[in-house]
Image (cartoon, helix red, strand yellow):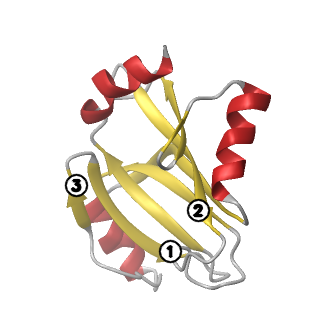
Amino acid sequence: MGRAIGIGGIFFKCKDEKAMKKWYKEALGLNPNDYGVLFAFNGNSHPTAYLQLGTFPETTDYFGEESQRAMINFRVEGIESLVVHLQTMGTVICDNIVSYDYGKFVHVLDPEGNKIELWEPVDGPFDSETMQEMR
């Protein structure tokens, strides 16, 4: 059965996304990308893994309900079997699993209706690009 293996990202809505990225750069010395700030760390199954601190416009509907100000992305393994398991528990699956060169994604609702993102990562595409940006 699939399972969560860590946090893949923490996403939040911002009134001024550009100003927020600028603040993270100037105040904390972080190097923002198009989606927020990417952190590298030693992963379980890959020498380097990544966590995204994601900034989204306040008007995004990506999180589902307008009142939801933040969303957690969990790194998972075995996403297909995890979705089957969640379905047997009666969990609301918001969409179908989609694949990109950096992994597979699906969104589900927790028991209180909070939308969360599940990501089965392929960290390789980030390696060369990210390491150059982080220097």
Q: Foreground residue, 113 or 27?
A: 27
Q: Secondary structure at mark 1?
A: loop
Residue sticking out furthest to the right: 27
The residue sitting at 62% across, 83% down in the picture is 113
> Considering the image in quadrants, where does the N terminus appear?
bottom left
The first of marks 3 and 2 along the sequence is: 2
Q: Is residue 112 left or right of residue 95?
A: right
Q: Nearer the viewer, mark 3 or mark 2?
A: 2
Q: Is residue 11 left or right of residue 92?
A: right
Question: Label 1 near label 2: C-beta < 8 Å?
Answer: yes
Question: Label 1 near label 3: C-beta < 8 Å?
Answer: no
Amino acid at circle 3:
Tyr
Look at mark 1 in the image and give the residue it sits on. 62
Which percent across, then down, holds residue 107? 43, 72
Amino acid at circle 1:
Tyr
Look at mark 3 in the image and give the residue it sits on. 100
Q: Is residue 27 above or below residue 100?
A: above
Q: Secondary structure at mark 3?
A: strand
The residue sitting at 64% across, 28% down in the picture is 30
Q: Which mark is residue 56?
A: 2
Q: Is residue 95 left or right of residue 110?
A: left
Amino acid at circle 2:
Phe
Structural distance between the alpha carbons of marks 3 and 1: 17 Å
